[in-house]
Image (cartoon, grey):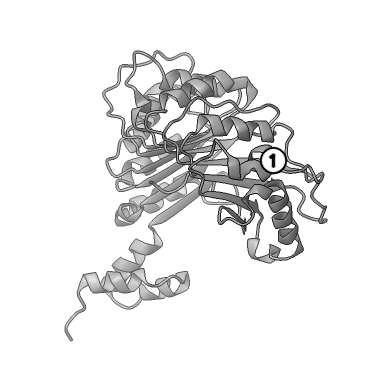
Amino acid sequence: MIPLPQELVDAIIDQVDEVTTVKSCTLVSGPFLSSAQRKLFRVARILAGRRNLSLADYSHFLSESPHIASYIRDLDIRAHPMTEPAALIHILAVVRNVECFTLTIVEMPKNNPAFTAALLDCVCRPTLRRLHLLYMQGVPSTILSAAMAVPAVSFWHISMDATEELPQSDFTPRIRQLSLLNSGSAVLDICNFLLHPRKLLYTTHIEYVQIRMDPDSASYDHRFLSACARTLKFLAIDPGALVDTINLPYLPFVLGVEIEIYIDHSRQLPRHFPSTLERLASSLPIVETITLSFVVEPLHPEFAWSDQGALPILGPSFKNRTEFLHLRRVHCKLRARNAASYKGPVFDRFVEAMEMKMSGLLGTEILTCAVVNPQPRFIAPLL
């Protein structure tokens, strides 16, 4: 029997979505075993410190099966508390082809240059396209500098090592997307790092920013976004409770903006949302798409939305507007788990409320509404 070409076997396996079927393919023949393992181990989630295997167990498995490590493209490690740095060092060393790397360890191991070197080596992999660092305390600036050479990066509530001198860096910035969802004093350190005059200008090519904006960091947020103004095309804002009007710098090339809006049982828009929307109009002269992502708690029982009247800038006077001249879409998203189950009264009331608040868009194709599942933790796919 003429053996099937490996390319054909790979194509067959790629069309199989059910995990049990892919596992069964490992029993067919050698070519199918290799292709099936490559698909099964493309994504590796290592959740240590709970009712799971230890980091040492994962490290031993990859030592016994080194070919498996070469198949891993998406690596997510959550190790807290961090009790096995040696095992993690080994895992980082053997996973050489990673394209997406997520690390949650809460606190960097202290006085462990071997771990810092292993993490730096992983961040510097030429294959790496997406990097997510979560809840890490005391991250060396060398790691953050290397991260700027990754096209898409997320910093979620991380802090820098405040005792460390900023090193001179020879990493060429390739970053195009940055998710910066720190809050409080931690974000100030990150902004100072990104905008340090002695460093490479990391912001010169950023096209997509996802950012937490609150009054405590308003001036830093403004400085950072101003530094990105020449290249920024999309902006996603998490304003928290929106306790004050958001003031953006002039961003002349932003085409799309998304804002999270938190709604409680009163079913009222935050008091400062209308003024925030008006500020957006003056700061984003060519914006084409506005996405309003509503997080409503609780969804049940079904409270009626409050009649706050139309938003001034999207109300009846919209047809005679002098701002938002390029606006093509206002997309209102109601975020809910099991979104398909909310295509009833909850959604109908949501649509009715949006049409009332944006009455100037009725009769156009600008306003759209949808129920969507909660968005992923991390930024959108690469532009």
For residue 54, above or below residue 15: above
Q: In the image, residue 81 lies at what x, y percent? A: 56, 36
Asked if one can make out residue 294 in the rendered structure from this viewpoint, the answer is yes
> Viewer-proximal residue, 210 or 288?
288
Residue at the left extreme?
2
Residue sitting at 32 percent across and 21 percent down?
200
Lateral position of residue 18 relative to residue 244, left or right: left
Which residue type carries mark 1? Leu
Above or below, 111 against 315 in this view is: above
Residue 29: percent from left, percent from top: 29, 76
Residue under label 1:
311
| Secondary structure beneath label 1 | loop
What percent of the width, then of the height, locates residue 15?
37, 72
Residue 344 falls left or right of residue 84:
right
Pick out the residue farthest to the front. Answer: 320
- Quick one: quadrant of the N terminus? bottom left
The residue at 58%/55% (across/down) is: 364
Query: Looking at the picture, how far across and down is residue 289, in whole percent?
Result: 51, 46
**Residue at horizontal 73%, vertical 56%?**
352
